[in-house]
Image (tube, helix red, strand yellow):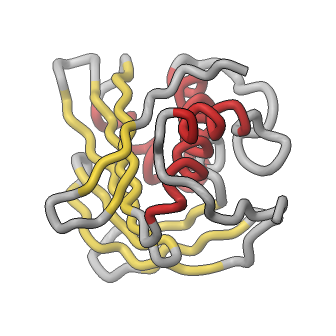
Amino acid sequence: MSADLTGTYLTLDDGRPAVRFSRTYDHPVERVWRFATDPDELSQWFPARAEIDPRPGGTVTFGGDPNLPESTGRVLAVDPPRHLSFTWGDDELRFDLEQLDGRHTRFTLTHVLAAENTAARNGAGWEVCLAALDARARGERFEGAHAGMSAPWKGFYEGYVAAGVPSGAPVPGMD
């Protein structure tokens, strides 16, 4: 499978590795904020069920992923409807929203990685998850799994590896 890769591998100013994705949606920033923070909306595209207490230091509860145990994270920063960052395991997720005009919002997801060798695996996973969000934003139903081993992430993973993005981390449910 030849996959069109939309993520970028980068090293942040503080030296940590990350993968970053950006999308523009035909919705005002408040609607995109709900896609990124409402548990029922998140469940349509995010890899796990996430319940977020939206305040600095608030708890994020993750569940519903058959390959990972239930866990919790911590909200690092929140500025509705522009920014949310929280821990997920040893990683950090950042959602940044920018109102471009009255109808369009840029959504940027940055996954700050604890381990560089997870970049290709996590990038591939986000490609599938964000395809589900893209469909949701268009008012369409995403057909097929957006997370897990049945999701079509393998072609994306191979594309990221071929592009030289760091790889080699175990894949939950496969290793």
Q: Position of residue 83 (x, y in %)?
A: 25, 53
| Residue found at x 70% / y 38% | 153
Q: Nearer the viewer, residue 119 or 126?
A: 119
Image coordinates for residue 147, horizontal then vertical, percent = 72, 47
Picture quadrant of residue 116:
bottom left
How many marks can you see? Answer: 0
- Give how far across and how far down residue 72 sits, in percent: 55, 80
**Front-most of residues 7 and 131:** 7
- Left or right of 84? Residue 136 is right
Q: Is residue 153 left or right of residue 74?
A: right
- Name the residue rendered at 57%, 63% in the picture: 50
Identify the image quadrant of the N terminus. top right
Q: Residue at x 27, y 46 (%)?
A: 96
Establish if 18 lies above or below 32.
Answer: below
Residue name at image x 59 percent, y 41 percent: 124
Q: Does 10 sit above or below residue 128?
A: below
Residue 143: % across, % down:
78, 25
In the rendered structure, the answer to whether residue 37 lies left or right of residue 143 reads left
Query: Nearest the camera: 65 or 164?
Result: 164
| Above/below status of 13 relative to 147 | below
Quadrant in the picture for the C terminus: bottom right
